[in-house]
Image (cartoon, rainbow, N blue to C red):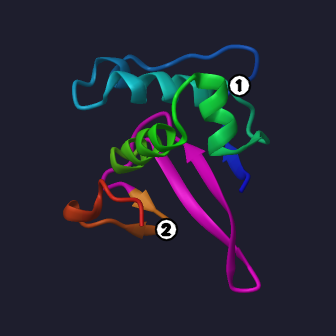
Amino acid sequence: MEHEFINNTRDNFTIVQNDILRNNTVSLKAKGLYTYLLSHKSDWNFSYSGMATQLKESRTTIISIMDELIALGYLIKTQNRVNGRQSYNTYEILIEPITPPLNRGKILSPENRLRNT
């Protein structure tokens, strides 16, 4: 399944705020994937498998890292449905994390923040 990506930053360069880079609750892999995501334009369509191949990680690892970024509020995931069935996901990357994090427009409870349901 392909997914849609929203990035409201500028093209041709990537600036990452020091806050995420110095945040000791964010893993090194999440910092790297966050920077990689920031480097893409807003109309970029991707698949987990394609990203895994490009980044030399497993598909499961990519999904896990994206879940971490969602749980920390740096990424918003919205499920898009066509005819009542899940069609694709839209991921919006944020410069500053949302507190509490949002997932599909719903605020997650603390015990569910690390799960991507």
Kindly indicate whether the residue at mark 1 contacts the one at mark 2 (C-beta within 8 angstroms). no
Q: Please identify, in this view, whether the residue under mark 2 or under mark 1 is nearer the observer.
A: 2
Residue at x-position 36% and y-position 54%: 101
Question: The residue under label 1 is which amino acid type?
Answer: Arg
Instruction: Please state if 51 lies on the left or on the right of 43 as rendered.
Output: left
Q: Is residue 80 magenta?
A: yes
Q: Pointer 2: what residue?
A: 105
**Mark 1 crowd level (few <14, some 14–19, many ≥20, 10 Å Cα):** few
Tell me if 36 is positioned left or right of 103 in this view. Answer: right
Q: Main secondary structure of the magenta part?
A: strand
For numbered disc 1, what is the local secondary structure? loop
Q: Which residue is drawn at 47% across and 21% down?
A: 32
> Looking at this view, is 56 or 44 the one in front?
56
Q: Which residue is drawn at 27% across and 25% down?
A: 23
Residue type highlighted by circle 2: Gly
Q: Residue 31: x, y in percent?
A: 42, 24
> Distance of mark 2 from mark 1, alpha carbons?
25 Å
Q: Is residue 34 left or right of residue 41?
A: left
Q: Residue 58 carries which label?
A: none
Quadrant for residue 29, please give it: top left
Q: Position of residue 10 (x, y in %)?
A: 71, 25
Segment tinted magenta in the rendering:
74-101
Q: In which quarter of the image is the C terminus?
A: bottom left
Image height of 113 relative to 87, above or below: above
Vertically, is 111 above or below 65?
Answer: below
Q: Which mark is residue 10?
A: 1
Q: Is residue 12 magenta?
A: no
Q: In which quarter of the image is the N terminus?
A: bottom right
Q: Which of 3 and 54 is in front in this view?
A: 54
